[in-house]
Amino acid sequence: MLSIENLSTSYGLIRALKGVSLTAEDGKVTCILGPNGAGKTTLLFTAAGILKPSSGSVKFDGAELAGSSAPRILQQGLALVPENRLVFPQMSVRDNLLAGAYIRHRSEATEIAEDLENMFDRFPVLKEREEQTAGTLSGGEQQMLSVARALMSRPKMLLLDEPSLGLAPLIVDEIFSIIRQMNNDGISILLVEQNAVKALEVADHFYLLDQGKVAFSGTPGEMANDDVIKRAYLGEH
Amino acid sequence: MNFDHIDIVQSLIDGVLFGSVYALVGLGFTLIFGAMHKLNLAYAASSIAGAYIGLASITIFAVPTVIAFLVGPLAAGLVGLLIYISCFQFMPRNNMLAPLMASIGALFFIDELIIDKTAGSPITFPVLLPDAYFPVGEFGFRGDLLFVTFASFVLMGVIVFMLYRTKMGLATRAASQQPVASLLCGIPTHRTNSTVFVLAGVLGGVAGCLAAAAVGVLSPLLTLPLTVKGLIVAVIGGLGSIRGAIAAGFMIGALENLFLLFRGVNERDIYVFLVLFLFLVVRPNGIFGTSIDRD
């Protein structure tokens, strides 16, 4: 279980997170909604160790991770799939996946090779592009590569930052079915999304982040009945 | 003036062979730039420093010349690590100027240290294979230059192998192309960067020792020309391009010797700079036109 308490992160004088508290349960899909600039990416970057919080705590399975380095947090089983995918553009798809397994020990070579094959089974399009450089892939393919790369570290929980961003509707459907599938395989998921309609299909719990604070917390049912959220995120009047 | 075709071909041969030293130094610049997208201007100075330490191991501890050729590169690798720690590791990642200026400082620090310790005078460096000369028809190959070229090719092979066939190389390429994502893959950037500095340093140390052995003397006056030539080679090859640096090294070696033959030692470097100028205008991304794309 990931539990974030009273987390604050600043860029210089700008406080992007102002005491955020939320939890993401094991085996569930937790979704964070929020407008641009609400601090969603900052929250995930802080949880993953790319940014250092100014105060607060990030606990994962009981271990305090706030302020730890990104490699150490990944070792604990918390992997981030960043916004805009950030694949290694001039490396082959295969090398991108192997980079994802960097933290695993050399003695696991056979398991890593098996996982590589598993990824190719799960994402057949990556198998077709195995030797192609990642920069030549389409946006959707890069998103799958980015997810597969994170899975190569065998995380317990996956942090997904707007995986549907800029993708065609059919690809978005595919991404969400992958999310559901990963969740069925036992990986907990913390999902940041702007596409609330799609998120409603997979999420077990919702948070709304606004101006660096949690503005709403509730189940999908409660969310779908909240007037403000309905208007702002579900396009109903 | 008339030039014998034998003179021209012979100077091309010598130039290409000596160009392997430029290729090594250019490769070092390009490796560091490729990894960090920052220039380490103290790089050639660390190569010369390595050669001096190798030389000191002969003059002070009377080790065999072969050992000195191992001590020099290792020392240069260590100097490279020290430069990384002092000029790069703690600088803000987005600040380009701070490490650049710090490395210029390190360049002059090393240079002045050498001048201080040697009273600024050149010291003879043990010559490699003094009697080896291989005549081929009307031309000839100097044994030491052949050895220099051979050693350079072996080293370049080792570097390419490490970058493309090892886990460390995979991590280094990842960190170079997408630093944030490499952190998210658990790659400790400081470790890959410092490894690159040590490797490049060793490469430079070998280049420094080989150059000193081929010339026969070691002088603090070598630092700046080697810095400038190494940078020219790295830029003409396309910063970050390994094969570019290697090709440009041999090309600059050959052209330099031709300019020397046709225009004399005083004008030689003017033409080398003109070549750089030409490349910056016509092929700003280097011989092979590759530039490292960043997302």
Image (spheres, coloured by chain):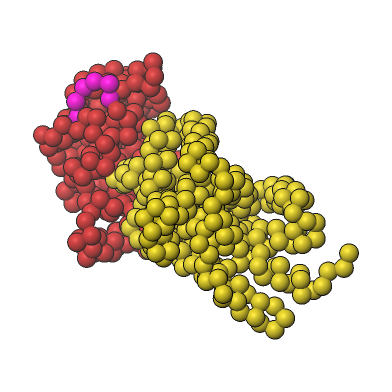
Chain colours: A red, B yellow
Q: Number of numbered discs present? A: 0
Quadrant in the rendering for residue A16: top left
Q: Measuring from the top left, give residue A200's x and y in whole percent.
A: 27, 35
Which of the two residues, A143 or B2, is positioned nearer the viewer here? Answer: B2
Please name the residue shown 61% across and 79% down the image. B134
Give the farthest residue toward the right: B1
Name the side, left or right, on which B103 lies relative to B180. right
A111 vs B161, left or right, is left
Please identify the dominant SS of the magenta region. Answer: strand
Task: Residue A7: give x, y in percent of width and height.
Answer: 24, 22
Q: Residue furthest left?
A: A62
Magenta stretch, residue numbers: A53-59
Determine the residue positioned at 51% across, 55% down: B208
Pinpoint residue A223: horizontal percent, then vertical percent.
25, 26
Q: Is B141 included in the stretch rendered in magenta?
A: no
Q: Is residue A166 visible?
A: yes
The residue closer to the viewer here, B285 or B8, is B8
Residue B199 seen: no
Extreme residue in the bottom direction: B137
Q: Residue lying furthest top in this view?
A: A13
* Residue A57 among those drawn in magenta: yes
Residue A65, given in percent of the width and then of the height, sits at 19, 33
Quadrant of the drawing holding the N terminus of chain B: bottom right
Q: Is residue B193 above or below residue A233?
A: below
The residue sitting at 71% across, 71% down in the picture is B10
Q: Is residue A114 left or right of residue B233?
A: left
Work out whether A50 lies above or below B279: above
The residue closer to the viewer here, B160 or A167, is B160
